[in-house]
Image (tube, rainbow, N blue to C red):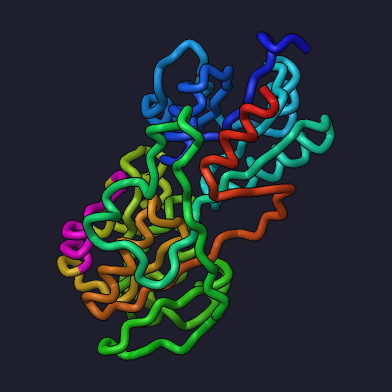
Amino acid sequence: MPASQRRLWLIGGTSESVQLAEAIASLNLLCLVTVTTAAAKSLYPQTPSLQIQVGRLNGKQIEQLCQQQQITAILDASHPYAVEISRIAIATAQRYQIPYLRFERPLVKGNEGDGDRCRDAPWRVSTVKAGFEQRLSSTAKPNSLNPPLQTQNEPSVITLDSFETLVTGDYLNQQRVLLTVGYKVLSLFQDWQARSTLFARILPAVTSLEAAIAAGFSRDRIIALRPPVPFELEMALWRHWDISRVVTKASGVAGGEATKRQVAAQLGIPLIVIDRPVVTYPQQTSDVAVALEFCQRYL
């Protein structure tokens, strides 16, 4: 295939994917970026080497995309919980022998980060052509499941393996709970509306609001806010609603997890972290340089 026709597929939807797109564009590599919303599209650089496609993709559409766009490599920088697109992309890559690399957002360990640092993404590519010197540091994943809740004077981070483990357990009983987990899983908490006081923080989108209302959240218990949420605002929201439990995903610093850990520690509120779904990636990295070297190798 002529080099002029080769194109990378960057699976987007995260702040890291935006910055990777910027770096790829600075190298003048042809790249197709896929996102699910028009709002996400606006975050990416407008440059001739980048083609941005909006819309959700199923297996058939992904196969057509790879063939029509003559994709020679796949860089998957989708959200850690967007497992469906990753699994389909992996299957397609294996079927058509397309090189695949997962760019995995680093995990947060302990109280990593602080209120000021967490306002920004954990890395920015500024000197891509000068040796790919930007690096990400990966951290170990907590292993404990269902640890005992501690007192308000001994705030804990409770790591659970799934939302099912959370809703079938007794973690939320008679608590004032803030859910910062996205709209797609809110229906799982509908049965808890009578046993606890639930609040939902969602993205400012009609789909998110409709899902929250359908799951039994009254309008005075919903806040639509696009992250990142600054430390001071996060703390003010928890205090305003007199929150006693917070549920979040292991979404990394860019997803606001580090900020929530800091606020939880300061206010003495247990933070329940739902671990990332298990996906068997053929190969993965949290290293920017490795990702960019992968792009250059196949384009």
User: What span is colored magenta in the figure?
Assistant: 226-238
Q: Is residue 163 visible?
A: no
Which sits in the foreground, 141 or 207? 141
Lateral position of residue 260 relative to residue 19, left or right: left
Q: Is residue 65 above or below residue 206?
A: above
Does the magenta segment cover residue 172? Answer: no
Q: Residue at x 22, y 75 (%)?
A: 266
**In which image quadrant can residue 151 be found?**
bottom left
Lateral position of residue 21 relative to residue 280, left or right: left
Percent coordinates x, y for residue 69 in the rendering: 68, 16
Q: Is residue 171 above or below residue 58?
A: below
**In which image quadrant can residue 164 be found?**
bottom right
> Quarter of the image containing the C terminus?
top right
Percent coordinates x, y for residue 187 in the rendering: 48, 58
Q: Residue at x 50, y 34 (%)?
A: 131
Percent coordinates x, y for residue 145 in the rendering: 55, 80
Q: Residue at x 50, y 37 (%)?
A: 132
Q: Residue at x 47, y 27 (%)?
A: 129
